[in-house]
Amino acid sequence: MLSTLLTILIVSSNVEAQSKAPVTPGEAGAKGGGRGDITKFGAKPGADSTQALTDAWKEACAATGSGVVTVPTGTFVTGPVTMAGPCKGEMTFNLQGTLQAPVKLATQGWISFNHVDKLKITGSGTLDGQGQEAWNCAKKEATCKSPTVNLRLDYVNNGLVEGITSLNSKNFHMNVISGTNITFQKVTITAPANSPKINGIHVARSKGVTITDVNIGTGGDCVSVGDGTSDLKVINAKCGPSHGISIGSLGLYPNEQHVTGVTVQGCTLSKSKYGVRIKSWADKYASEASGVQFSNITMDNVENPIIIDMMYCPSGGCNTKGPSKVKLSDISFKGIKGTTPTIDGILLNCMPGSCTNIALADIDLKFTGTKGPTKANCTNIKPTLTGTVNPAGC
């Protein structure tokens, strides 16, 4: 009896000791649910943490069950990192601190996720692109333009980006290419108004993307929509400064996929160069956008609040006399109200035969400039008008 009791106590003591024994990062991953705090892989605040971030992702991705990579509070410098899948389970990138890019960096993506299914990027941390030097160079020399995007999501399915901040990206802040079912919510994007055409969130060749309750201020488009985008929702976004919420530019490249099913609703744009717009190149390549609804939009001192520009040519040298190969159909602007300092409150500039079933409903734009009043200017289009449309003229 006594010997049996001693055996039980010894076994119990061994089990307790094993449960309290430290678990290495490798052992944690092997047991499922790698919880990879990057400091356990050698990351230190202020030091180059590129390899630590890479190693943490590889282990978490290979873990059975869910995997987690955590960037704790503090500022960690890192070069470009591609976190690739497929992984064995759903992945969480927990950003609590700040990741800081090198001042000089020329690569398409800085923090990139590639071929990952069930990805969550969450936290209250910041991606600091340190883009000021790249912007200054780009303004002086075309060869200095940096393609570096703060956050790239390529071939990501069933994703969530929530709570994080993107600061001073060298190029676009967040870029979604060939993804499905991705939600951005409560994301903050910040860069000066004079940052050179630095778009906030760009979506292309993706389906089922939702952007909601975001706050974006930057030198380019707040949200930009590229070819092949379908079932996109932009809801309750606050934009400004920005170049507005834009579809296009379309028709720049051959074999572009159609844009269809875009809903922009309940958004507020403040002190922006454009409001809601669709832009396409004249006399280049075929493309199409259809099923687009802009509704319940508030404009606060926005230049060109409603615009279709089918002669988009920002650098000059375009053939604007040839027929457009881009087609726009089933486009509605409804419940758009607010203020504008420019004369052209509504500018619908279509090419002959290129715009069909375009609707304006319940528009009220008040002029705040010194020379006015604001007006509607429509070319090669006769939109359907419903309710009060101010300014009138189309």
Image (spheres, grey):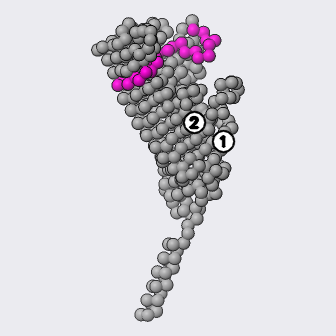
Q: Secondary structure at mark 1?
A: loop
The residue that appears at 58% across and 15% down in the rendered structure is: 313
Q: Which residues are magenta?
A: 295-320
Query: Residue 168 bears which disc, if any?
Result: 2
Residue 141 image point, x, y percent:
70, 24
* Observer able to see residue 204: no
The earlier-in-sequence mark between 1 and 2 is 1
Q: Nearer the viewer, residue 121 or 330?
A: 121
The residue lying at 55 percent from left, 31 percent from top is 192
Callout 2: SS:
loop
User: Is 300 within the magenta?
Assistant: yes
Q: Neighbour class for label 2 at 10 Å: few (<14), some, many (≥20)?
A: many
Name above or below for residue 88 compared with residue 103: below
Question: Which percent across, then down, holds residue 207?
Answer: 46, 33
Q: Residue furthest bottom?
A: 2
Image quarter hosting the N terminus: bottom left
User: Mark 1–mark 2 contact, CB under 8 Å?
Assistant: no
Amino acid type of the residue that numbered disc 2 sits on in the rendered structure: Asn
Residue 92 position in % (x across, y down): 50, 50
Residue type indicated by callout 1: Pro
Name the residue carrying label 1. 102
Is 90 magenta? The answer is no
Q: Quadrant of residue 82?
A: top right
